[in-house]
Amino acid sequence: METPVVIPIHDPLITPVNAVRGAVAGSDVQPVDLVHDRLDAVSDAWLDELALGLSEQGWMTLDVRARLGSELLAALQKEVQILDRTDAMKKAGIGRGSDLMRDRSVRRDKIAWLQGITAPQAALFEFFDAIRQGLNQRLFLGLKRFETHYATYHPGDFYKKHLDSFQGRASRVVSLVLYLNEDWQESDGGALQVFSRDIEHKAYGTVLPEAGRMALFMSEEIPHGVLPANRTRYSLACWFRQDEVPLPL
Ligand SMILES: O=C(O)CCC(=O)C(=O)O
Ligand SMILES: [Fe+2]
């Protein structure tokens, strides 16, 4: 049995979602086109399915291409690809200086936090907030907010087996990953590996990071990792949190 690597996670400075919405409404960014039927897309039956998957298995994977729409997915893909060509994507890691070097043996991706101030991000935030509320109504999780970042894994990059949150921290409670890659093949590597939540941490399943595929799991319970990618892998991770403001770990 291999013990999962458990990594403390530092919080970014977070802009409250409501403030972001205000900024969007007050600017010339028009999220409306991309939102179209977004809230209808998050139906009660679908939220029931999410709640059931989380409470019974602790994790699940879903195809949300039709719910989000190919236009929004394409817009998010374009954003992360543009960011990846600039220095906006920062090496993910914990700590500073030599600590960061050590973290590179655990995690090699680059990340950029979303602010919700572009039209695709605002539309996505609506979708995530509907999920947050739906899970609260069904599972009484008291999820107050979410935080989300783009991630890129260049060839050779990986993320070793880890948990997204420490038990009892009431910080990250539910994790969501949305993939943004067209025609991902098994030979491209970069699969998400999910392990069982019991003591044995058996390999439970793998998820190919194909565009429109979403993985959802309980942050404190489900060990998971990303196998080395053989081609650039784009994704977006989101954590639903119980704390109102970022607290020190
Ligand atoms: O991209 C993935 O499949 C998972 C990423 C992950 O585990 C994380 O960012 O914490
Ligand atoms: Fe993770």
Image (cartoon, rainbow, N blue to C red):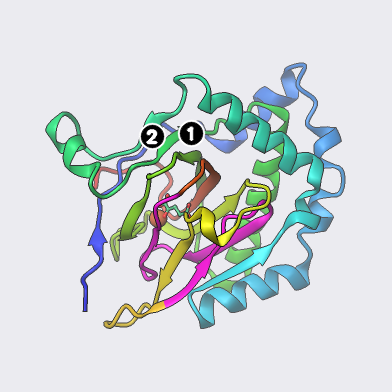
Locate residue 185 relative to residue 58 in the image: left or right. right
- Between 62 and 48, which is closer to the camera in this rendering? 62
Residue 229: assigned label:
none
- Between 207 and 60, which is closer to the camera in this rendering? 207
In this rendering, the answer to whether 20 lies above or below 187 is above
Residue 12: assigned label:
2
**Residue at image x 59%, y 30%?**
81
Which amino acid, by three-letter code, is at mark 1? Trp
Q: Which residues are magenta?
A: 204-229
In this rendering, the answer to whether 236 lies above or below 110 is below
Instruction: Name which of mark 1 and mark 2 comes first in the sequence.
Output: 2
* Disc 1: which residue: 113
* Callout 1 crowding tier (Cα within 10 Å): few <14, some 14–19, many ≥20: some
Where residue 235 appears, as percent x and y from the top left, is 55, 45
Quarter holding residue 50: bottom right
Residue 186 magenta-highlighted = no
**Residue at image x 54%, y 25%?**
83
**Whole-Å distance between the Cαs marked 1 and 2?**
8 Å
Where residue 26 appears, as percent x and y from the top left, is 73, 19
